[in-house]
Amino acid sequence: MGEPGTARWVLLIHQIPPKPAYLRVKVGRRLQGLGAVPVKNSVYVLPLSEQAVEDFHWVRAEIVAGGGDGTVCEARFLEGLSDEAVEAQFSSARNADYAELAKEGRALQQAMRAKGKRGTMSREQAVAAASRLRRRFDDLAAIDFFRAPGRTEVETLLAAIDGALRPAPESSPPSGNASTEKHRGRTWVTRTGVYVDRIASAWLIRRFIDAEATFKFVRGHAYKPQPGEVRFDMFEAEFTHRGDLCTFEVLLADFRLDEPALRHLAEIIHDLDLKDSKFSRPEAVGLDHLLAGIAMRHQDDVARIEDGAAVFEGLYEYFRRKK
């Protein structure tokens, strides 16, 4: 039996009348949109937060207005269901959603590769399709409370699609002219749910480019920067994938960071982020496990960057001293 303690969950316990029939469908869609999962018949759960409580109150109000009944309460599972089992239900639901997005992403990639053949989409159509996929991913990531494993594949697919839609390296090479003085004390903006390339790039930025950097995390893939902000590893960012280069590699090239230890790190990050085995670095598997553990441990992006910085600082020191 678990010990009593702080509640981790918020429950909606409801009863919906048989008529009108559309009410059950409407409530089901609302709960699905919130990311709630059922733990028993007519009992739905969300991780406890002010937003989750407010969302369930609104659903309850709709049920009551339709002639039903409902209760919203905070809860902690003591017997039967465990916290781990409930978390697994959330991950299973999100994995199914991510699998559908991945299927559509692969189909879009195939259509883009067939460019020039009869019946394939134009670049404008591909950009529009990629934007729709990204918006759906952003909405899904917002209710992915425990970072389901399927999320990584979709992130990688979207990054590859974004890269393919940018100008080829020949027409947009790394300039090598970016100034650390110009970029000092900036707010660096990237997408929420930071992982391999974004965690590594954040470490690189604060370690070698802008020691005073602050980071901002946004859901929108086409976020427009405010004064004093610069974007990285997101669509149309100032520093992001170019051709077959990941963002970490682009930052190295643009800021002329040519230290051998950093090149070693760049090869590992490239293999992890683009999954093309270009460098076949044996360290990639271990680093992948470390970063996955950090992502599982922290939902907060700042905490992920802080933990990740310690990992990359250690790797950098190893390669700097290794002969």
Image (cartoon, rainbow, N blue to C red):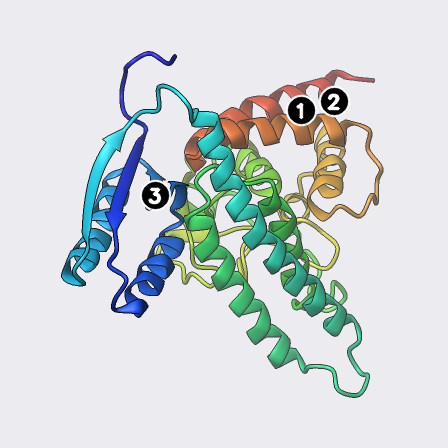
Query: Mark 1 is on which residue type?
Result: Tyr
Residue 288 visible? The answer is yes
Query: Mark 2 is on which residue type?
Result: Phe
The circle drawn on residue 44 is 3
Question: Compared to 45, does 76 lie above or below?
Answer: above
Secondary structure beneath dot 1 equals helix
- Determine crowd level at label 2: few under 14, some 14-19, many 20+ residues with C-alpha closer than 10 A: some
- Determine crowd level at label 1: few under 14, some 14-19, many 20+ residues with C-alpha closer than 10 A: some
Looking at this rendering, what residue extends furthest in the bottom direction? 118
- Residue 61 left/right relative to 231: left
x, y percentage for residue 297? 49, 26
Toward which corner of the image does residue 258 lie, by quadrant? Answer: top right
Residue at the (72%, 48%) spot, across then down? 274
Secondary structure beneath dot 3 equals strand
Badge 2 is on which residue?
319
Q: For the residues marked 1 and 2, what is the alpha-carbon distance in whole angstroms?
A: 5 Å
Residue 260 visible? The answer is no
Badge 1 is on which residue?
316
Q: Are marks 1 and 2 in contact (CB under 8 Å)?
A: yes
Q: For the residues marked 3 and 1, what is the alpha-carbon distance in whole angstroms?
A: 46 Å
- Determine crowd level at label 3: few under 14, some 14-19, many 20+ residues with C-alpha closer than 10 A: some
Question: Compared to 169, does 4 lie above or below?
Answer: above
Q: Along the polypeptide, which appears first: circle 3 or circle 1?
A: 3
Q: For the residues marked 2 and 3, what is the alpha-carbon distance in whole angstroms?
A: 50 Å
Q: Report the quarter where the C terminus lies.
A: top right
Secondary structure beneath dot 2 equals helix
